Image (spheres, helix red, strand yellow):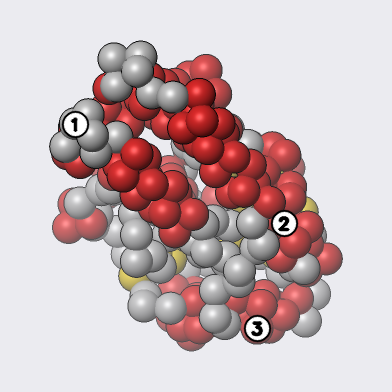
């Protein structure tokens, strides 16, 4: 059986992407006098990508990328009032309540009762923003540990699993992002359960048909996680590491 069950936070345990979608819509409305919506979409995405190495993932970088996009696409004609509004949108995103996804708390409590497993939260983004979401979620006490990381790659997962005293083959990750939650875990020898969310940031999009791994499954809701963990466990070898870069 898996000794460690890891969950992603944003759009796996609680809703997150709708906040970014609504802010993006307001930015397009604000810049509609200057450029079309597609131009806003393209420029904002490029700004986000170029700023990742500076601000990382999360609301702060997104807000600054919106302001940068507005200034550039308006040829510096955007008003101070509009820039102030964008800053306030970012603050409101940080202050927004954490809305749990249906069934998330029930699944976590199901595993908390199993003392032979460690339940860990592995989430990516702004440290302060993520801490606020976790505190407001009311779920923090259900985890054996909380890991807030700047990037999710195979080395990150190996290090986290190691800190909890388990091999990758003894861990399963549950998340909504194929790029961040699934592929890196499979690459280091773990198992993964994908729960698609209604909205996916284009930077996180991956062609699922390219994934060929017996230790991976996609489900429609978090409520289906327990039964699918049981199915995956039936195929676990008694010893050794499952999965490799060759079959991801």
Badge 1 is on which residue? 35
Cβ–Cβ under 8 Å for marks 2 and 3: no
On the image, the x and y values in percent for residue 107 come to 62, 80
Image point (22%, 29%), residue name: 34
Asked whether the viewer can see residue 225, the reply is no
Give the residue displayed 31% in from the left and 44% down from the top.
29
Q: CA distance from mark 2 to mark 3?
A: 16 Å
Q: Which mark is residue 134?
A: 2
Residue in the picture at 44% in, 59% down: 18
The image's mark for residue 223 is none
Q: Which residue is mark 3?
A: 106
Q: Position of residue 78 (x, y in %)?
A: 38, 23
Foreground residue among 131 and 142: 131
N-terminal of the two: label 1 or label 2?
1
Is 209 on the left-hand or right-hand side of 131?
A: left
Q: Foreground residue, 112 or 33?
A: 33
């Amino acid at each position: 059986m898996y000794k460690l069950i890891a969950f992603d936070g944003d759009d796996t345990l609680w809703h997150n992407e709708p906040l970014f979608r609504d802010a993006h819509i307001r930015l397009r409305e604000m810049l509609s006098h200057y450029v079309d919506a597609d131009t806003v979409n393209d420029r904002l995405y490029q700004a986000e990508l170029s700023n990742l190495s500076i601000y990382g993932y999360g609301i702060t970088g997104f807000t600054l990328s919106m302001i940068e996009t507005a200034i550039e696409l308006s040829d510096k004609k955007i008003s101070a009032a509009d820039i102030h509004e964008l800053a306030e949108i970012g603050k409101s995103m940080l202050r927004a309540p954490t809305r749990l996804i249906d069934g998330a708390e029930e699944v976590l409590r199901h595993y908390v009762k199993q003392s032979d497993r460690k339940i860990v939260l592995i989430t990516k983004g702004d440290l302060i923003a993520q801490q606020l979401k976790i505190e407001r979620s009311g779920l923090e006490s259900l985890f054996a540990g909380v890991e807030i990381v700047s990037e999710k790659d195979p080395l990150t997962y190996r290090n986290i699993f190691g800190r909890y005293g388990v091999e990758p083959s003894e861990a399963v990750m549950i998340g909504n992002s194929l790029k961040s939650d699934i592929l890196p875990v499979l690459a280091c020898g773990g198992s993964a359960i994908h729960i698609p969310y209604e909205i996916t940031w284009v930077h996180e999009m991956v062609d699922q048909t390219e994934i060929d791994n017996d230790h991976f499954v996609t489900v429609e809701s978090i409520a289906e996680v327990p039964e699918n963990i049981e199915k995956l466990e039936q195929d676990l070898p008694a010893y050794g590491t499952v999965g490799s870069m060759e079959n991801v």
